[in-house]
Image (cartoon, helix red, strand yellow):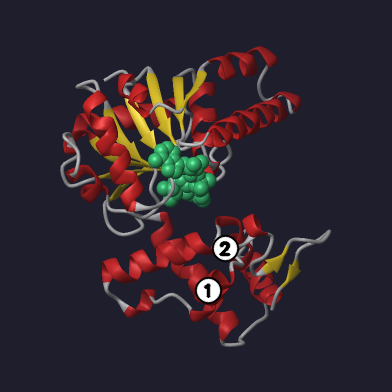
Amino acid sequence: MDVKSVGVIGAGQMGNGIAHVLAAAEYEVLLNDVSQDALDSAIATITGNLARQVSRGKITDEAMQAALGRISTTLELPQLGQTDLVIEAATEREAIKQAIFEDLQPHLLPHTILTSNTSSISITRLASRTDRPERFMGFHFMNPVPVMQLVELIRGIATDEETYKSCKTVVDRLGKTAASAEDFPAFIVNRILMPMINEAVYTLYEGVGSVQSIDQSMKLGANHPMGPLELADFIGLDTCLAIMNVLHDGLADTKYRPCPLLTKYVEAGWLGRKTERGFYDYRGEVPVPTR
Ligand SMILES: NC(=O)c1ccc[n+]([C@@H]2O[C@H](COP(=O)([O-])OP(=O)(O)OC[C@H]3O[C@@H](n4cnc5c(N)ncnc54)[C@H](O)[C@@H]3O)[C@@H](O)[C@H]2O)c1
């Protein structure tokens, strides 16, 4: 199927990035959220990010205006039923995602493909609650969307080949690279990345190294562009903990048990950059390790 229009549900940090790259690749985008503030700030973020691309000579001003012209916003979820492809990028809570798909279902065109940007929730389970599990799959962008090259395409147990091919064509047109993953907890990237971050927190918890020495070791010793604790702060410690819990529950293996220190940071509300405190304190001029 030739996808021309895309509905994006959730205008948060992922949804605005997804709308940005789709519009830049000449898709018509309808961006939805339950909050007008979220829609307004998404448009402001997209405008700022496109303007930065113009100032760096990556795109022209005409291309920026054309991309912005392809994005419409709405608080009305049913309107998204008229699009060819829906990418759900709302809050990572299964009940929210299920309610969205349930509310959208009566308004869908027969051919519309449904996808979710979920980092960890079972695609098969989300799909099973809809009328079209064969036209449902995981469409998992990385953060920040305009910068990161990879998109994981996750087939649920019922996803058909045509749906996969249609989504792969979209990824190709975005100039990104698709990695295909089966529907098991946390898919590929987070299955590997999160246990590494969790192990870094254990290394801190057991006193093997300080925040600074752990991050420096992985940057200079393993050539990682960011240290694991710095990266955890960037992702959000609540998100890291939620994904570790999904791995622990879904694979029932003690090797995935979340580090108690990670839990403690989340309980403190020290969630990383978004709350200005995590493994580093971001309230001053330069980030200062909190341990
Ligand atoms: N943050 C990341 O690094 C990352 C990476 C890949 C995937 N994801 C996934 O992307 C999704 C969104 O994450 P985010 O970081 O953008 O979250 P976010 O909190 O920045 O944004 C979520 C948005 O969803 C909106 N929302 C909530 N309920 C809604 C509803 N019923 N209908 C429409 N909109 C609704 C909220 O108002 C908010 O604007 C999650 O599933 C997350 O797991 C996140």
Task: Give the CA distance from mark 2 to mark 1.
Answer: 10 Å
Q: Which amino acid does label 1 sit on?
A: Leu
User: Residue 262: which disc?
Assistant: 1
Rendered position, 279 above or below 40? below
Q: Position of residue 246 (x, y in %)?
A: 34, 64
From the top left corner, tell me how far across and down residue 166 is, in percent: 29, 27
Q: Quick one: 282 or 93, which is closer to the camera?
A: 93
* 257 up-or-down from 274: above or below: below
In-image side of 1 versus 233 (left or right): left
Badge 2 amino acid:
Ala
Compare residues 236 and 184 and report the one nearer the observer: 236
Residue 291 in the image: state x and y as whole percent: 69, 78
The residue under the point 64% across, 67% down is 278
Instruction: Determine crowd level at label 1: few under 14, some 14-19, many 20+ residues with C-alpha closer than 10 A.
Output: many
Kindly indicate whether the residue at mark 1 contacts the one at mark 2 (C-beta within 8 angstroms): yes
Which residue is drawn at the image coordinates 27% and 48% (left, top)?
123
Q: Which residue shows up at 17% across the image and 34% down it?
A: 132
> In the displayed structure, does residue 66 sit left or right of residue 84?
right
Query: In the drawing, what numbered circle is on residue 232?
Result: 2
Q: In this view, does 245 lie to the left or right of 146?
A: left
**Res 206 → quadrant:** bottom right
Q: Can the viewer see residue 225 in this picture?
A: no
Residue 275: give x, y in percent of width and height: 64, 59
